[in-house]
Image (cartoon, grey):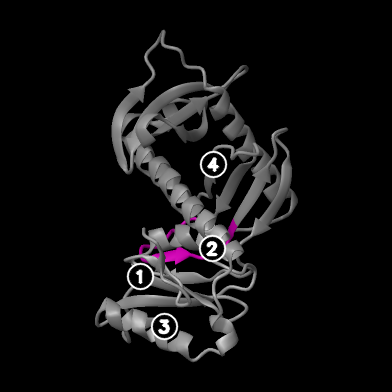
Amino acid sequence: MIKRKNAVLAMAAVGLMAAALAPAAMAEVTEAEKTANAEAMATGKLIYQYDQAAWHSTDALLALIKPADYPDLRGWVVEPHDDGKLLVTYFGQRNGPRYAIVRYVMQGAAVVEGGLVPKGEDAALSPLANRLVDARDAATERFVKEKLGFCTEGSANSVILPPDGNGRIRAYMMSPSVTAGVFPLGGHYRFDIDAAGKVASWRPFLKSCMMIDSRPDEEMKEKAFFVVSHLLDPQPTEIHYFVRYNVPIDMGIIMADEDIWLLGTDGFTNPKGSEIGMP
């Protein structure tokens, strides 16, 4: 961690680190890296948005009902809604199809509308919602089969994204944040679910349980920068971006070729080029 006097000093510190690298490491970013990074950035932001919708709608749910009063309650599912909003459905299941108990329309972290599904109203889940729930079940089954583990205790976090252009659903099983100011960088997995509902592939994003601790301590009254090595990919992954959205500090990701990507509070950049994105 680097103590911040201001954001400029923090970014300059990594700039000096980049300048010290061998010239070969400062070659132009390849088009493949740019494309992969752009996809990772967009996906990381989407994971964050879906996670926020589930989190804040859960707060609304618990203020509305006591889950113990709904023994059929089985889980939740997030799907796209109109005008960039997200629909979060808390569903039940007994002996037949899943059915909606509570629905919330979310705009960012705010509940726009929703509540208990009135009696007589169509409570059936959409085909997409059912497919996303099935994808989560498939990912959970493979997680157990592979004997994978999380880096924190508490309820596992999951985000299931809608199918991409190839019909692939990306299901993320993630370690939850259980301590204020500490966010896990390790213990996150992606499961790619094919159009038949089977796990086509899966991957971890880090092979250790590294934590990003942004809490002040005796040495640093304010922590502002975190630097981590990443050897599994040539550019940041969607999990790097997802984590960055969840922590109040800048991140420097050092790749296997000693290339550095900066995930800052004011934008995401690479010292080999110009600004490549904004939060």
Above or below residue 26? Residue 35 is: above
Among the two numbered marks 1 and 2 on one chain, the one whose residue lies closer to the N terminus: 2
Q: Separation of disc 4 and disc 1 at Cα?
A: 26 Å
Question: Is the residue under label 2 in contact with that under label 3 (CB below 8 Å)?
Answer: no
Question: Hey, what amino acid is under mark 1?
Answer: Ile
Q: Which residue is mark 4?
A: 161
Range covered by the magenta-colored residues: 175-188
Q: Quadrant of the N terminus?
A: bottom left
Q: Separation of disc 4 and disc 2 at Cα?
A: 22 Å
Q: Which residue is mark 2?
A: 34
Between 227 and 38, the residue placed more toward the observer is: 38
Q: Position of residue 264 (x, y in %)?
A: 37, 69
Question: Is the residue under label 3 in contact with that under label 4 (CB below 8 Å)?
Answer: no
Among the two numbered marks 3 and 2 on one chain, the one whose residue lies closer to the N terminus: 3
**Disc 3 crowd, CA 10 A, few/some/many (<14, 14-19, 20+):** many
Disc sitting over residue 14 in the figure: 3
Q: Which residue is mark 1?
A: 249
Question: Hey, what amino acid is under mark 2?
Answer: Lys
Between 119 and 250, the residue placed more toward the observer is: 250
**Residue 178 belongs to magenta span:** yes
Between 5 and 276, the residue placed more toward the observer is: 276
On screen, residue 191 versus residue 184, left or right, reads: right
